[in-house]
Image: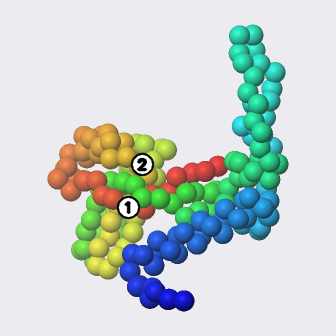
């Protein structure tokens, strides 16, 4: 019997992901339940298939095990789920707009919070985050999945704050998307 050495590089990462996938597939196919799975939803896509069709519509029959039906539509807790003040968010890669960055110890903090309140006043539904990473105070705005979404808001902010026009730009960042 011959043993091949395992090289610790990208193959190791691939093997690790394959193992995780195999374990999850085993759990799902055996119908095993774990504490990582949330409770099943009250209404699933299978319920909409099984309702009586309207006139002119066909009937869809789904042959599926009950274990898989219970898993469809359930949320799995993972490292990219964040719960803040009772609200659940998906944390993923996306875009934000950096509106302010300053390192003046006397004025930067106040200016960042002042701009944050002005932006929240103008756009009530938008999230604005003031952060401090020594020596910089920064103000980031929004949670955008695409560069195009962020571009639209970038133009809006540059029009509302012409004195900051050259400081406002789009950055890649971890964003929070509401799940509830």
Q: Is residue 117 left or right of residue 21?
A: left
Q: Residues within 10 Å of mark 2 (few under 14, many from 20)?
A: some
The residue that label 1 is drawn on is 173
- Residue at point 52%, 75% (across, down): 16
Is residue 81 something that shows in the picture?
A: yes
Residue 134 picture location, percent across and down: 32, 80
Q: Quadrant of residue 21?
A: bottom right
Location of the N terminus by quadrant is: bottom right
Task: Tell me the element at label 2.
Answer: loop
The outermost residue toward the top is 55
Depth check: 149 or 16 in front? Answer: 16
- The structure's colour scheme is rainbow
- Residue at point 81%, 21% (across, down): 52
Q: Is residue 145 left or right of residue 43?
A: left
- Residue at point 36%, 55% (across, down): 96
Q: Residues within 10 Å of mark 1 (few under 14, many from 20)?
A: some
Residue 32 picture location, percent across and down: 80, 64
The residue that label 2 is drawn on is 145
Where 62 sits versus 24, above or below?
A: above
Residue 115 picture location, percent across and down: 34, 56
Where 43 sits versus 39, above or below?
A: above
**Mark 1 or mark 2: whose residue is earlier in sequence:** 2
Is residue 115 something that shows in the picture?
A: no
Say if mark 1 contacts mark 2, CB within 8 Å. Answer: no
Depth check: 1 or 173 in front? Answer: 1
- Residue at point 40%, 42% (across, down): 122
Residue 29 picture location, percent across and down: 74, 58
Label 1 to label 2: alpha-carbon separation: 10 Å
The outermost residue toward the left is 166
Q: Is residue 158 left or right of residue 130?
A: left
């Amino acid at each position: 019997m011959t043993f091949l050495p395992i090289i610790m590089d990208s193959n190791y990462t691939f093997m690790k992901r394959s193992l995780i996938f195999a374990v999850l597939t085993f759990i799902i196919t055996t119908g095993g339940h774990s504490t990582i799975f949330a409770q099943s939803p009250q209404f699933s896509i299978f319920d909409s298939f099984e309702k009586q069709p309207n006139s002119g519509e066909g009937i869809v029959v789904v042959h599926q095990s009950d274990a898989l039906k219970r898993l469809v539509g359930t949320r799995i807790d993972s490292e990219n789920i964040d719960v803040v003040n009772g609200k659940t968010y998906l944390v993923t890669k996306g875009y934000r707009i950096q509106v302010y960055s300053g390192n003046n110890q006397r004025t930067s903090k106040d200016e960042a919070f002042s701009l944050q309140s002005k932006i929240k006043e103008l756009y009530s539904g938008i999230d604005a985050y003031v952060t401090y990473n020594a020596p910089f105070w920064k103000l980031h705005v929004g949670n955008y999945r695409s560069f195009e979404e962020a571009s639209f808001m970038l133009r809006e902010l540059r029009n509302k704050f012409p004195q900051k026009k050259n400081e406002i730009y789009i950055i890649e960042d971890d964003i929070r998307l509401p799940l509830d």
